[in-house]
Amino acid sequence: MKLHKSIFFCLTSFLQFLTISQVCGIYDTEAYIPYLINKKVAVVVNQSSIIDNQHLIDSLISSDIHIESVFSPEHGFLGISPAGEYIDNSVYRNHLPIISLYGHSKRLNDEDLKNIDVLLFDIQDVGVRFYTYISTLHYVMEACARNNIKLIVLDRPNPHTHYVDGPVLKMDYQSFVGMHPVPIVYGMTIGEYAMMINGEGWLDNELICDLSIVKLTSYSRGDIINIPIAPSPNLRNMNAIFLYPSLCLFEGTLISIGRGTDLPFEMYGAPFFNTDFRFIPSPNLGSKNPKFNGELCYGINLENQNQENFQLNSTISLEFLIDGYSRTPDSLKSKFFNSFFPKLIGNDLLEQKIINHISENEIRLSWENDLRKFLMIREKYLLYN
């Protein structure tokens, strides 16, 4: 039933917001099809790569474009694998190889790109540093640069392009959930981000990717865009997507953010909270072994937050994290943060600030300087007002 509910959301949302999603670069076929004619093409796609109610692969094949191979990121080609789950290679329509970029390697092998002329990238991102599609983008750009392959990114609107917030990642904490010195919310489309990776020299060995961006049409970064297809199994609606930059910080703590329930990223809690709202995590499509599996938990339900406030919001919130720590018994506080937390936040400072009860306003002051410097870098790569 939960699987059906998730699929229902995707289909109804697609029909409801189709005209809005037509701002995406995927619809500007005249801007990229000519580069693919008589070429051997590879694509980096997943379940979000839809044009005119069909997958981009089928659309290209119907235009007589020769596709050699398909690459898929975390969560897989269908977008249904849980976060962090190993994904095997597979096939599309019984003949086209799908090479997993979240399996034995997260990097593209040179052998996988043998004889490829052009690579097309079209994945719906959510504009948050620890959402791994931009890390996949980095490795794709690196492989293309190494093999002299042109990369075309079909740009997409991200729901958090209207603001920039959070600490800038310190490179000592670089990982697949944070590869670049950017804040948690960096306020860029994935096309703009690709230009920044190139322009700032972040690829290994000073490589430069032959990069083209198919821009969005009739788009302003202040526009409120509803993402039509769930970008990953636990971001099932816009409320969860807007809460994601703030609630994902709990992934580095004792606290559950609702994986294994019908409200992932729309709640937080634990067995030791003292609240009226209750939930029991159990394995489902988005989580095979959720935190507190089978245990009665108490928490805070954010399902009915005012979405307009989140859509217009210009900051991430530390309120939830501070509240979660304060609700944790003293006997467990030493175990509240785990080793994953510094990778998520991008430094080793926030943990101590929360433990020492530093106010949210004071914490924000600590990253203002780095944000100003980042905004100056970012300005060079913005394609939209």
Image: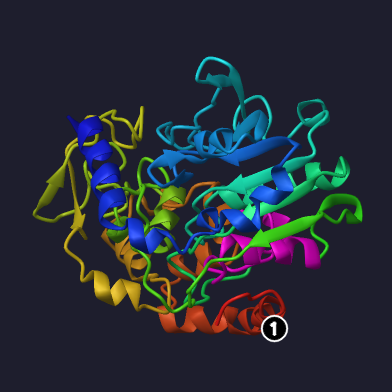
In the image as oriented, which residue stretches furthest toward the right? 205
Q: Quadrant of residue 149?
A: top right
Give how far across and how far down residue 250 sits, in percent.
Answer: 40, 53
In the image as oriented, which residue stretches furthest toward the left? 276
Question: What kind of residue is marked 1?
Answer: Met
* Start-end of magenta stretch: 170-199
Is residue 268 visible in this depiction of the protein?
no
Q: Is residue 183 left or right of residue 198?
A: left
Q: Is residue 244 left or right of residue 199?
A: left
Residue 30: say if magenta: no
In the image as oriented, which residue stretches furthest toward the top? 94
- Relative to 109, is 204 above or below? below
- Residue topped by disc 1: 376
Question: 38 or 196, which is in the foreground?
Answer: 38
Give how far across and how far down residue 51 sits, in percent.
Answer: 45, 47
Residue drawn at (36%, 67%) of the image: 322
Give how far across and how far down residue 100 sits, in percent.
Answer: 60, 28
Give how far across and how far down residue 242 sits, in percent.
Answer: 35, 63
Q: Quadrant of residue 224?
A: bottom left
Quarter of the image for the C terminus: give it. Answer: bottom right
Query: Callout 1: 10 Å neighbours few (<14), some, many (20+)?
Result: few
- Relative to 227, is 52 above or below? above
